[in-house]
Image (cartoon, helix red, strand yellow):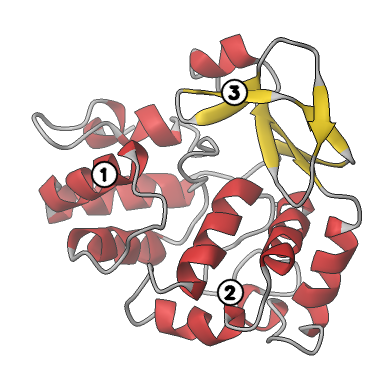
């Protein structure tokens, strides 16, 4: 494991493995980067570094990513990208369609059950929680997540991803029939639906810019937030 992944470089380059985990599978507040093309990882770090990539949610995880991208040198970026690109993606998130979900609270930038045992309607949300909160807080690389999504989301998302649904371009054209990516185009199968929704929303509202982002902006332009939820749910449900 490269030093930059394990320990970072003081004072401003944080250890990649702390947030994204040594297995690259990450958590809902950041990204699953295991198995992404090295070229794509390097491109995204450059976008953070040049302020081309932002998010509607300007919170600490994003600020730390921008800080690290701006402070890391080219060899560190290349070593980290090669490391994560070589990792094999695996199923980390179980997608469950449901009308009700546990009532949650925020802990460490992610949602966790609030302990009351009370359920509430899911509405049009994605509620992604750890399988085991204690193990997740210990950065246990064997303890994944459950993503609750509204009933019918996966089927609706499949229709949009495979045909465009009369609203957009089919995701399969660029991301591949199995959504496992083509060349430098990133795989999105089995990735966090919370993360995927954020990225679709950010493309739609201009928070992600740059040459590759320009390809996504017209794709999401006519989609509703319910469509974005459905697409994220479908992609997350696929085998990576």
Q: Which residue is mark 2?
A: 182
Q: Position of residue 207 (x, y in %)?
A: 38, 67
- Calculate the distance from the C-alpha at mark 3 to the C-alpha at mark 2: 38 Å
The residue labelled by disc 1 is: 63
- Residue 105: give its label: 3
- Which of the two marks, 3 or 2, is nearer to us in this view? 3
Identify the residue at horizontal 49%, vertical 12% (top origin).
138
**Figure check: 102 above or below 151:** above
In this image, 37 relative to 196: left or right?
A: left
Select label 2 or label 1 by which is in front. 1
Q: Quadrant of residue 175?
A: bottom right
Between residues 160 and 186, which one lies in front from this camera angle? Answer: 160
* Image-based side of 27 in relation to 165, left or right: left
Determine the CA span between mark 2 and mark 1.
30 Å
For label 1, the crowd category at 10 Å Cα-Cα, with few meaning under 14, some 14 to 19 and many 20 or more, is few
Using the numbered discs, state the Cα–Cα distance from disc 3 to disc 1 in whole angstroms.
22 Å
Q: Position of residue 223 (x, y in %)?
A: 67, 77
Q: Secondary structure beneath disc 3?
A: strand
- Mark 2 or mark 1, which has the lower sequence index? 1
């Amino acid at each position: 494991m490269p030093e930059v992944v394990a320990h970072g470089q003081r004072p401003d380059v944080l250890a990649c493995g702390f947030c994204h985990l040594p297995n690259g599978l990450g958590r809902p507040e950041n990204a699953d980067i295991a198995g992404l093309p090295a070229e794509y990882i390097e491109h995204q770090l450059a976008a953070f570094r040049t302020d081309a990539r932002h998010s509607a949610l300007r919170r600490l995880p994003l600020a730390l990513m921008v800080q690290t991208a701006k402070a890391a040198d080219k060899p560190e970026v290349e070593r980290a990208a090669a490391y994560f690109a070589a990792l094999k993606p695996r199923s980390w998130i179980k997608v469950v369609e449901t009308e009700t979900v546990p009532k949650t609270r925020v802990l460490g930038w992610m949602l966790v059950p609030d302990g009351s045992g009370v359920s509430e309607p899911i509405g049009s949300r994605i509620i992604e929680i750890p399988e085991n909160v204690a193990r997740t807080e210990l950065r246990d690389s064997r303890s994944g997540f459950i993503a609750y999504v509204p009933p019918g989301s996966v089927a609706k998302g499949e229709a949009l991803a495979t045909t465009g649904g009369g609203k957009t371009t089919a995701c399969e054209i660029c991301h591949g029939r199995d959504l496992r990516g083509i060349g430098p185009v990133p795989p999105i199968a089995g990735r966090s639906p919370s993360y995927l929704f954020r990225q679709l929303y950010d493309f739609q509202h201009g928070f992600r810019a740059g040459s590759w982002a320009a390809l996504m902006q017209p794709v999401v332009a006519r989609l509703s937030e319910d469509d974005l939820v459905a697409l994220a749910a479908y992609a997350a449900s696929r085998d990576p």
